[in-house]
Image (cartoon, rainbow, N blue to C red):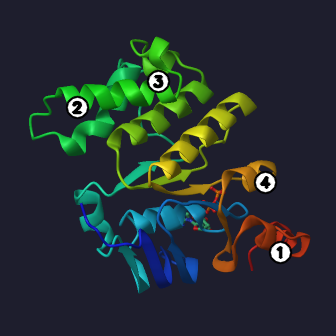
Amino acid sequence: MSTHPTPVVVDSLTAGYPGVTALEEVSLSLAPATVTALLGANGSGKSTLFSALLGMVPASSGRIRIFGTDSARARRRNLVSYVPQHEQIDPTFPITVEQVVMMGRYPHMGFVRLSRPADRDAVDEALAQTQLSEYRRRSIGELSGGQRKRAFVARALAQQAPLMLLDEPFAGVDRTSERLITGVLHNLRAAGTTVLISTHHLEGVHRLADEVILLHRKILAAGPPETVLTDEQLAQAFGEALS
Ligand SMILES: Nc1ncnc2c1ncn2[C@@H]1O[C@H](COP(=O)(O)OP(=O)(O)OP(=O)(O)O)[C@@H](O)[C@H]1O
């Protein structure tokens, strides 16, 4: 694993889609073993930033370094885990919760994907942390929306990467699951993992995050929650349509 000290450095990143500049001159860095909340209105570029960090949306200018390397290499080296906003797995597909969580171990396995004791231990641990052990043999389609979200957090946990990206993990989950996921992220931080999480749940952000980034295509503000979450800055981020 890379020993480069800075998990994420984004330098003047401009990126988007044909005809859409979703991110403009975005610069940020994430310190090791911190939780950073990414806040912004619908369409402010949060998911695009995750896609760019994962190397799925190219930069039209600027640069991203993850533990000192580029996004594609960081993924190949298992430096990044990701909980997407919308999961691609078909809920009618007959796959159990533990099989979904085991997918997080694929980067650790060889081509034939034979699980070893370390893989099974990591899955057990991830299921326990997300309180899904009793559901492990259920089909993923039989879980509630909030439980399913926890299963995808468990899959990322099982991956044991030093950087975790979570896109809206609190969307559609109740307060109990939100608190549980927050606790999981704090445990990760205590173990040295760096976390970037997008959320719309402003009330919980002080408790959740060490740092907050307010995004509105550009970075409006970044820093500790008490300096960023001012009425004026929140109005700027959430009160105006993107021009
Ligand atoms: N695949 C795509 N093709 C073209 N434009 C896109 C695509 N995905 C997103 N966009 C546009 O890029 C901009 C940023 O979208 P993005 O999904 O990153 O925002 P977001 O902050 O994640 O929003 P939300 O809170 O609604 O999930 C928006 O204008 C959106 O319409």
Secondary structure at badge 1 equals helix
Q: Residue 118 carries which label?
A: 2
Q: Mark 1 points at which residue?
A: 233
Q: As shown in the figure, which amino acid type bears the numbered disc 1?
A: Gln
Q: Please tell me which of labels 4 and 3 falls first in the chain.
A: 3
Answer whether labels 4 and 2 touch (C-beta < 8 Å).
no
Disc 1, ligand 1: is the CB inside 8 Å? no
- Report the residue at 20% width, 43% height from top: 108
Residue plotted at (70% across, 60% down): 42
Q: Quadrant of residue 209?
A: bottom right
Instruction: Work out whether 217 lies above or below 33.
Output: below
Residue 242 spot, x, y in % from top left = 74, 75
Q: In which quarter of the image is residue 123?
A: top left
Q: Name the residue under label 4.
A: 202
Residue 71 % position (x, y): 33, 68
Q: What element carries label 2?
A: helix
Measure the C-alpha gap from mark 2 to mark 3: 15 Å
Q: Say which amino acid is labelled 4.
A: Leu
Relative to 164, residue 20 above or below: below
The residue mark sitting in front, 1 or 2, is 2
Instruction: Work out which residue is located at the far front of the displayed protein and give it.
Output: 190
